[in-house]
Every structure is written in C-alpha cells, then in structure tokens.
Amino acid sequence: MFRKISILLLFMMVFIFSFCKKKNQTVQDNIAYQTVNVTLYPNDPLYFNLQTAGGWVYINGGVNGIIVYRKTATNSPTDFVAIERTSTVLPEDPNAKVKVQSDSFTLKDTISGAKWQIFDGGIISGASQNLRLYNAVFDGINTLTIRN
C-alpha cells in the first residue's frame, strides 16, 4: 500500500512541476548582449552634469557606450535612466551611434536619422524598436549602479 501511495505521489509531483518552467531571459531588441556592471558617483565633479535634473553624460560600457540621464533630483532609486548608444535601426553598424541632440531631450542615430526620447528610449521617428535600457539604481546618496 505504501508503495502505491509513493508512486502516485511521485507522479503527482512530476505532473505539477512539469508546469513550472524557469523564465528565460529574453532580450527585447536586436542588439548584441554585453554584460554591464558600472558604478558611478554622481556627486563626483567628473559627472557634474548629473547633479541636476535634465543632465546627461556619455560613459563607456554596453556595446557602443551608454547615455546616463538624470530624470529627477529627488534622490530616489529611479532618478536616473541608462540607455545603450547602439541604434536599434542599424545594430550591426558601429558608426550608427545614438547621440544626444542640442535640445537635451532627443536622441538621434548618426546614420539612419532615427530619433528617440532621452527620458525612456521611446521612439519618436524612424525606428521600430525602443533603445535598450539598463537597470539604473541610485542609492539616494552617492552611488549609481548600472547593470543588465
């Protein structure tokens, strides 16, 4: 009797766990994967532009570099956004870097002319995919960590 219950219990567990699948990490864009783990100190004079809302800087990292933009100055974990500079229109062309325009709000692909918003990498024109965002977490005091 114990053997039958054990076998039945085993089949039930296999049946239940067969529906539990680990989520695959999928990339939502067509840009090559590059590990990103960067720590910045926005209060450092090197990153003076990041000390106020609307400030931005280019940093090394990602595939073609990263744009770090300060959305607000509330010292909350979501003050910053980190955007990959590789264009989603021409991801294989290393010359198709996204640059911040003079209005400090628009990002533009230097080759295709596609445009995105700096606030969230959302499409303005000429593209079918948003720019890649990296996780940017600010500790509210001095440390900004950017990871994927």
Image: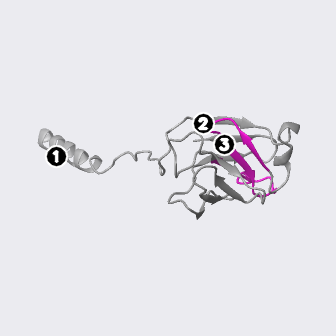
Q: Position of residue 119 (x, y in %)?
A: 69, 59
Choose the circle earlier in sequence order: 2 or 1. 1
Q: Mark 2 packing: few (<14 Cα in 10 Å), some, or many (20+)?
A: some
Q: Which residue carries the number 1 mark? A: 8
* Circle nearer the N terminus (3, 2): 2
Answer whether residue 65 is magenta in the image.
yes
Q: Residue at position x 78%, y 60% from top?
A: 103
Q: Is residue 148 left or right of residue 66?
A: left
- Distance from disc 2 to disc 1, alpha carbons, whole Å, reads 47 Å
Here the colouring is: one colour
Residue sitting at 53 percent across and 41 percent down? 93
Q: Quadrant of the C terminus?
A: top right
For marks 3 and 1, give the one nearer the viewer: 3
Residue hosting label 2: 36
Question: Relative to the observer, which residue lies in front, 28 or 110?
Answer: 110
Residue type of the residue flagged with mark 2: Val
**Of the residues tagged 2 and 1, which is closer to the observer?**
2
Question: Pointer 3: what residue?
Answer: 66
| Part of the protein shown in magenta | 56-83
Badge 3 vs badge 2, beta-carbon distance below 8 Å: yes
Closest to the observer: 13 or 123?
123
